[in-house]
Amino acid sequence: MMKPAFLILAALTASLHADPVRIPAHTAYLEPDANGARISENKPITGWNKPGLKIEWFGQIKTAGKLDTSIEVTLPAGKESRLRLTVAGKSREAVVKGTGSPAPVSFGSFDIAKTGYQRFLLESLNRPNETNGDVGDLLLDGPAAKDAHFNLKERRNAASIHLSYPNPEGVNVEAFYCEATAVADPVATYYMVCGWDRGYFGMQVNSPTERRIIFSVWDAGGEAKDRSKVGAEDRTMLVAKGDGVDSGDFGNEGTGGHSHLVYNWKTGSTQRFVVTAKVLDGNHTVYSGFWFHPEQKKWMLISSWKAPKTGSWLKGLYSFSENFGGANGQLLRKCYYGNQWARTDKGQWIEITRANFSHDGTGKEDRLDRYMGVDHGRFFLSQGGFTDDFVKYGTPFDRPATKTPPNDLKLPPLPGM
């Protein structure tokens, strides 16, 4: 059964209606195991029986005062479940009496002393073999519910956020250099370092045990999902790849050629990237991604691709931070991006010291915990964590110039070029 229309709005404003504010079960997170129960759109949380597994919602409370709380729980008739809700450092317990149907369970009132993001943490007090019940919507009422802001959509990812760099004017950019240092990098994080209008290059956390260096180049044409539908004249073709690099196709976000090196890059360690463009004619450009290997202490080719229907130098330079899996979208992600340089086709290095902040649609109204800034001479991007930090779309930032171009680039030659 579909929820009322107001539940699909990205921003929630509590009003003086008789009905409480509803925060859907599908917006909750699970700790410490993000996959410890089943969360589905417009359905209660089911399979909550793993010992120690907690359910948590996050929202921005904009009015201090009394907050009345309850949660819809479904429990088989004749069963009981003991649950505890913690808000603003205080806990309240409740005993659920099973009826076989969803019913609101009151946890009483909490005093919200100051505005800002709050966590609503639900825990089981039952023994391992007892039933916790299926958990539905979180219900809020009282003065502190006024103007409260929650993400109400099933998409639980933190917002994707970007740094857009101005292209140097009046020159042809044949190389874009940038460094990145991740300081908070949960699973399902992609820190894209060197991006341009035909591709992207960066580092990704795929699992607790696997990380990657990724370089991809888009096809020409407008196919969004299925590369098998892209004709030969529009396909980006592999020219070369480095040792240990896997290559193939990608889709669902445009189509193109993908490559990655499995490498466990380290949190807090600065990674160096450079992408180059070699214009072959008015219709083709070879784009190549090089990464500095920390152990080997030399530059290595990740991959090189011949892109059709472009014949242009690098433009649309940018970096971004993406949370590509929503199961842990509550966790903080943060990365520093620094020492940006563009090299012209004449060999001149031009330092880039300005970046503009932007975000995806999720960052417009649903997830406002996203921002950028300048710290220790570098730009940074941060999203998630349900912090109160916020930067307006389009805000420009300037970092101090280093005045030290990366003249030590000793890139390996491309085969046949």
Image (cartoon, rainbow, N blue to C red):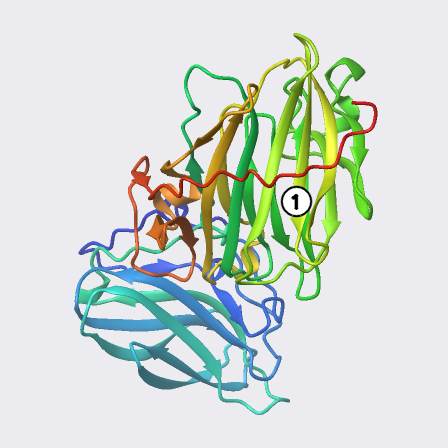
Residue 185, placed above or below residue 13: below
Across and down, in percent, residue 153 comes to 45, 50
Q: Position of residue 379 (x, y in %)?
A: 39, 47
Give the structural element (helix, strand or loop) at label 1: strand
Q: Is residue 385 left or right of residue 313?
A: left
**Is 131 in front, or is 268?**
268
Q: Between residue 172 and residue 356, name the one nearer to us.
A: 172
Question: In the image, is 225 to the left or to the right of 393?
Answer: right
Tell me the quadrant of the picture where the C terminus can be found: top right
Is residue 416 shown to the viewer in this render? yes
Number of numbered discs overlaid on the protein picture: 1
* Residue lying at 43% horizontally and 23% vertically, measured from the top left: 168
- Determine whether 355 is above or below 229 in the image: below
What residue occupies the far bottom of the structure in this picture?
127
* Local crowd size for mark 1, using a 10 Å CA cut-off: few (<14), some (14–19), many (≥20): many
* Identity of the residue drawn at 73% across and 27% down: 305
19 and 208: which is toward the camera: 208
Task: Tell me if 343 is positioned left or right of 278 in this view.
Answer: left
Q: Position of residue 250 (x, y in %)?
A: 72, 35
Q: Which of the 4 quarters of the picture holds residue 401? A: top left
Q: Residue furthest top?
A: 282
Task: List x then y, in percent, for residue 58.
Answer: 38, 64
Mark 1 residue type: Trp
**What residue is at 58 percent from the left and 51 percent from the top?**
271
The answer to whether one can see residue 20 in this image is no
Please, is residue 49 above or below residue 9 in the view? below
Badge 1 is on which residue? 291
